[in-house]
Structures are given as C-alpha cells and as structure tokens.
Amino acid sequence: MSLIPATIITGFLGSGKTTLLKRVLTEAHGQKIAVIENEFGEENIDSDILVSDTAEQIIQMSNGCICCTIREDLRSTLHDLAEKKRKGQLDFDRVVIETTGLADPGPVAQTFFMDDEIAESYLLDSILTLVDAKHAPQQLNDRLEAQRQIGFADQIFISKTDLVAKDEVDALIHRIKHMNPRAPQRTVNFGDVPIAEVFDLRGFNLNTKLDIDPDFLKEDEHDHDHHDHAHGEHCDHPSHQHGHGEGEHAHHHHHDDDVKSFVFKSDRMLDPAKLEDFLGAIVNIYGPRMLRYKGVLNMKGTDRKVIFQGVHQLMGSDLGPAWADGESRTSKMVFIGIELPKDILMQGLEQCLV
C-alpha cells in the first residue's frame, strides 16, 4: 500500500481553519479525505456539515469523505484508520488533521516520525497555518503558541485581510517573513483556497527542491536582537506594546518575537562527522526550542546534495540529486526556533567546514 499523505492544519482561534476544512470537504475534487479533529476544538466541523450521531467515532460522509473525532491520542487514531484502509473497511486517499487553536503543532508532526508503524503508513505532506490578519499582531505579541504555529508552517494563509488597512497587512506579512522565511504566504477570503495549494505541497518531503531565500533575512530597518530571558515550554508573553509615531510606517517598528529564523550559507564543504557531532549536541540542548530546521548541504565524500531537516529533537538526512555541472555547491541551512543562540550555531557550523 502506498503511503497515505497527511496534512496538518493549524492556526489560532478564529483564524478560519474550519471554514477552510469545510471547503476542502465539500468541493468536488474527487478525493476521499479522512479528517481528524481534536474533539475539544473550538468548533466541530461535523455539527455544521454532518447530521449524525456524534457518539460514532468515524463518520462516513455522503461524498465519501470520513470525519473522525479524537477520543484517544492521535497515534491510535492514525493506526486505526490505516488498519481499516488496509482491510478495505474504509476508503480514503489522504488525511487532514485539524489541531485545536491553542496547539503547538510540533508534537503532532513528531507523531509521524517517532512511531515506526505510522512512518510506514503515512507521509507527512505539510503543515498549513492560518493567520487572522485582524487579531494576529496581538496574538503574536501575547501567545507563544501563535508564534510556534508560524514557525512550523510550510504554507501560510492570511485570512480577514478585508478587516484591516493595507499597511497593517503589509506589516504582518513582513513580520511573518522574518519569523519563517521558508513558508510562502497568501491572503485568502472565507477559505477560498485552490486545492492545489492545500495538498501535495511536499513541505516535509526530503527530496524536493528547498527554497531557502536568505535575502528575506537581510537586516533591514529591523534590529532583531535576542532577548536575554529564557522561557518555559508554555509561556504566555505579556503584550509587548509597540508605540508608533503618528506618521511612522508600520514596517519600521521593532517586534522582538521569540520565534526567529536565520540562515547559514557556505561554499566550502562540510565534514560529515563533525557536523553530525555538532548538530547532535545542539539538538540535545536546544531541541525543544528548535521548531523547524532544514537545508541542502555540500558534504565531503559525495557528489550528491545532502538534504537534511528536523523538528525539535528529531532530525534526519537523505541523499538528494547530484549537483549539476556548473552549479554552485553552496550549503544552505535555515533554522527557525525560539531564542536560539545564533552566534553559537554559526560558529559551530563554521568549525564543521572542511
């Protein structure tokens, strides 16, 4: 049986996750989708789309889609679905997981790598994050979970842009780009997203071309310092009040977000043993704060690109395509995390060069 693609939809309360899901479930795309939603979520899809007895854990819908509510942990729900598909008891093409608005998507993503049986049944395709343009600036100031959802995203959809001024939307896009330069952003109205931008994005697929654009991270008017204070796993920030002068453009003020990103680039080859030792040590210490990290590496001992990526303490690498004739053999790595020590990481990676 080929791997079942899985998509995680995350986003803060009221950002439009359910609206997007309804569209995905009701559009005539010819795909049969199993939707898994956290039962304590703020809205239940099935109450709007389905008329059924909610005591049933798996509900088959009229268009062949399936709706499940998690009454136990995600792992057992995924096991259950894969087994029913194998036995021919359920027919579906892919899985979509809607997280509760307050969730950190990290543990959900890790489920696909930590459990062998799930790794052999599913392919984690991507994490989609919805952002509410009206409330996001405040949520990003106050809630670390909202920042983490941005940090984990492979694709970001910004909703409710009609409720705010254009310069505020531009400022939000700019801010998000600094937090996560690798996730494309697009504005959406009422979940109106082409299916092609929701499925088969291969955001987590190791063998895709990784678009890491270091220009996003050029220090412009922003001065992104790291804070000195440490945070617990689930810290709620007091709102950072950002004062504006009357005529000041929205882009110019300073957001000291906990979630930041930076890129390491080098044209020199990396030493595999040194890199493995260094990254192992870093992940051991800072793993819980490392949301996403990935890269294309020019490694000593192979003519092929080495594709590497990780989530928290889990990381892996794979041989990608050969470097093309005349192609610049540049290693590029992007790190997205909470108050990561950029200096230590940059110096350590420099020392891994041949």
Image (spheres, helix red, strand yellow):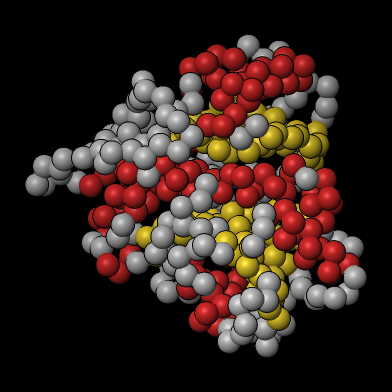
Q: Residue at x 64, y 76 (%)?
A: 55
Horizontal side of 35 relative to 162 (left or right) equals right
Q: Residue at x 34, y 50 (%)?
A: 139
Quarter of the view holding residue 222: top left
Residue 267 visible in the displayed image: no
Q: Residue at x 64, y 48 (%)?
A: 109
Above or below, 17 against 115 in this view is below
Residue 326 % position (x, y): 72, 34
Above or below, 349 against 2 in this view is above
Residue 39 % position (x, y): 56, 64
User: In front: 51, or 190?
Assistant: 51
| Residue that protrudes farthest toward the left in the picture | 246
Quarter of the view holding residue 237: top left
Q: Residue at x 48, y 17 (%)?
A: 343
Residue 174 % position (x, y): 36, 46
User: In front: 338, or 183?
Assistant: 338
Above or below, 251 against 74 in this view is above
Question: What is the total number of numbered labels drawn onto the structure image?
Answer: 0
Quadrant in which the C terminus appears = top right
Horizontal side of 270 relative to 256 (left or right) equals right
Residue 354 visible in the displayed image: yes
Residue 70 % position (x, y): 64, 63
Horizontal side of 90 relative to 9 (left or right) equals right
Horizontal side of 244 relative to 294 (left or right) equals left
Quarter of the view holding residue 83: bottom right
